[in-house]
Amino acid sequence: MALVRAAGAVTAAAPVDQRYLFEARQMQALSLAVHIPLVCFGIAFPALVLFAEWRYLRTGDRLYRTLARRWSKIMLALFAVGVVTGTILSFELGLLWPVWMADFGNVFGLGFTLEGFSFFVEAIFIGIYVYGWDRLKPWLHFASGLPIALAGITGSMFVIAVNAWMNQPTGFRLAGGRAVDAHPWSALFGNPFFWSEYVHMYFAGYIVAGFLMAGAYAWAFLRGRRGRYERTALGISLSAAAVAAPLQVVVGDWAARDVAQAQPVKLAALEGLAVTTKGASEHLLGWYNGHAVVYGIEIPRLLSLLAFHNPNATVKGLNIVPLADQPPENVVRFAFQAMVGIGTLLALLGLVYLYLRLRQRRLPTARWFCWAVVLAGPLSVVALIAGWITTEVGRQPWIVYEVMRVDAAVTGARFIPFGYGALWIVYLGLAVAMAWLLRRFSQVPLEGDDAG
Amino acid sequence: MLADVPMVFILTGITAYTVLSGADFGAGLWTLLPGGGRADAASTRDHTRHAIGPVWEANHVWLIFVLTVAWTCYPVAFGSIVSTLAIPLLIAAIGIIFRGTAYALRSQFAHGEERGVRLVEGLFALSSVLTPFALATVIGAIATGRVPVGNARGDLITSWLNPVSVLAGVLAVAFSGYLAAVYLAADARRWAERSLVHDFRIRALVSGVVAGALALAGLLVIRASAPSLWHGLTSGAGLALVIVSAAAGVLTMVLVFTGRFGLARASAALAVAAVIAGWAAAQAPYVLPGLTVAEAAAGRSTLIATIVGVAAGAVVLVPSLAVLYWLVLRGRLDTAEAPAAAEGQAAGPGQAGAGGSRDRLAGAFAVATLAAGTGLLVFADPAWAHGLGAVALIACAVTVFALASRPAGE
């Protein structure tokens, strides 16, 4: 009884009159957009660093040691920034959406608690690994890096589990707008829609981190620095991205069919499908004018085929819910098409690289190829952010799909314009600092690094 | 009873964060005040930076731990606290960004780049003061009952800008400086830096006196402006813990005075733990006004899940932390010059590839896993088939990566 009273005190006033809801959402989006690329490095970078060190241990070739050691310093700097931007996110989830926390924290919170432990393991062993060069025995040093790679995988897994739950909420009963009878384990990990989202992000981690790193070395190639160090570094990073990019097409198809099944409104928004249609067609490009996609390239029945493996399948349209429950269609659709378009180009680039590398047994170094790799780095980040816009904006107006609206979750505190402005200034400063830092890393001469 | 267990986790986390990260913040404070000792300012700054290098990120994670347990197990209280205290929390968050960035940047400056170094160190020091101050005002606000239950129901300003909160903030800064000085003196001794040992011992004694005086002043302010907290702290368990804390504080001073820095670390930690436990005892059973711990707690299965999760996490965490601190305290991760242990065993560029047949086998494996993964993910429906498909694709990726990333000619 007391519990219900206390809970009522938080939810009774909801939705509060928050004039700056849009700014609150932008503030959250800004913080996520800054943090997510760093997550990609958290997923992929430790494995690549360890791969280089393993090569050194197997072959005794000191070039690999230099490579692993230099990369590990960049890894530490990116991790430091990832720690703080991730901390901002955990503050913001409460600062901006306290009612969401109050009403549903008992269901999804466990995911973040577990992620906290992954974070711990990462932070502990990254300190040992990076400060342990020359201090620990070689294989022991290598072993001290394994927990970092493992924690990078589990940490992102726990967070994605929460996001998958927001998209497909289960494992609780609703009483007075609030979750009761919560079963966090099954809500987070028994959710069948979790796995496609997670694997999709996991591959994205290798694509983004791999292409960004490869881009830096391709740039060095274009500037005439084509030593064995640059060739080896380019080979490892580009191989990771080139392998992941084509496979991501298959994973993405899996994720889209999960969306089709669980979140028909989101699928309709992705495709600009106004009304429920049998044998729905797919549109490339174009613009949704409120009723249909205009000026696009129409491919008959393809949407039904892709979503349900049947050219005559019925695909639900936006009209199955009232207008107030529909996401902003063009934002979602444009983001989705950007992700798919860029993803396709990256997959092609990956296949070209793999063909040249495996069939012709050489590292492609033509100028056009180097330029393509240089461009692939930033483009992969754009695709990553576009993908997250697709799934997050595509869920609007819900924070918990069909259970809680975003405007019911927002804080009543009147600090948002101030906070949003401050965060922009801080993140712009952070971006400048990171750019300077990475440039600095690239200028350290090779010999000095190995001696230090 | 079950409802109290996560609160014990939270209080433990706050204690660990104060004792460990507090010292890292204090190290930042000393980079702001590096002069006046026997050692020169530059080597004092270098010393503080090297001392916190391997540990500060792990120490910082305690804050995340506290937040996540709080929002999982006491969601209503958490929502009320963060909405009313949005401003100090935002300030703390910005301070945390500055700190992490400044730390990442600092190590990349070469000698002689004075302007850049000044700027980054100023930022680091400023954020090291701002963050503990802001976080401690949050504690002050909760302890004095200024956070009502509800979405931003409390005053956005006076909830944390009031005598008790401000005093708590200043005390936190002084106390972190004190902890840092004790730890840094111990580290300086390990590195046999006698002038730094001398300096940090003096700094520890001075900041210890300041922190003690602020703590006493704080009690007077609490007596004047927060009668219920005062009552809690001066009776029963609250009183006992305050006495323990004061005794541990005095003991720490004696240990520092006589140069036993290792023991001083432990007794300083005890003083912090006792203050935090005393605060908890003083306001038990209430988390927020009118909301007891039992009322604030999430449902039974959430609590059990969290306890199981934390217990399982502890199995991983405790040995990991033990390894980290063992290596750090034994000086195994020091950046000072040490004999390189990993030389030798350079066998020259390794053996060439074992030949075509293994490659063909790997290639066939890659094609098979690709076909299986694609087939299972695209054309099968059950969840287990999708899981198997994802595993097959990852196996394919690893194989192709192994083939593609080998050393290549031009």
Image (cartoon, rainbow, N blue to C red):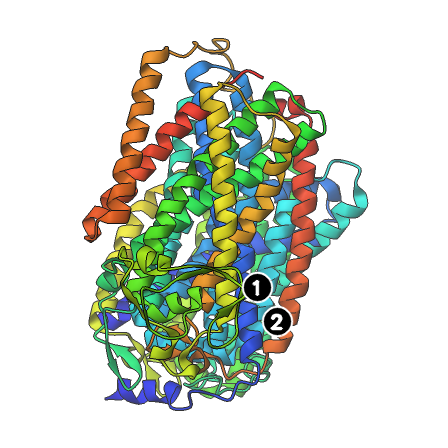
Mark on residue B172? none
Q: Judge depth for marks 1 and 2 and give the one in front.
A: 1
Q: On screen, B358 above or below B50? A: above
- For the point 25% across and 60% down, which residue is it? A191
Residue B89: in sight, yes or no?
Answer: no
Mark 2 nearby-residue class (10 Å; few <14, some 14–19, many ≥20): some
Find numbered disc 2 in the image and state the secondary structure of the residue it sits on. helix
**Kind of residue indicated by mark 1:** Leu
- For the point 55% across and 62% down, which residue is it? A31
Mark 1 nearby-residue class (10 Å; few <14, some 14–19, many ≥20): some
The quarter of the picture where residue B9 lies is: bottom left
Instruction: Provide the residue designation for mark 1.
Output: A30
- For the point 41% across and 33% down, which residue is it? A144
Q: CA–CA distance between discs 1 and 2?
A: 9 Å
**Kind of residue indicated by mark 2:** Tyr
Residue A90: in sight, yes or no?
Answer: yes
Along the viewing direction, whichever of B207 and B29 lies nearer the viewer: B29
User: Circle 2 marks a residue in which chain?
Assistant: A
Mark on residue A420? 2
Find numbered disc 1 in the image and state the secondary structure of the residue it sits on. helix
Q: Earlier in the sequence, mark 1 or mark 2?
A: 1
Q: Residue B171 location in percent, x, y? A: 57, 68
Do dots 1 and 2 share one subunit? yes
User: Circle 1 marks a residue in which chain?
Assistant: A
- Residue B135 shown left or right of residue B231 in the figure: right
- Residue A365 shown left or right of residue B313 in the figure: right
Q: On screen, B28 above or below A451? A: below
- For the point 56% across and 70% down, which residue is it? A26
**Marks 1 & 2, CB-CB < 8 Å contact:** yes
Q: Residue A289 location in percent, x, y? A: 52, 74
Q: Residue B213 location in percent, x, y? A: 59, 69
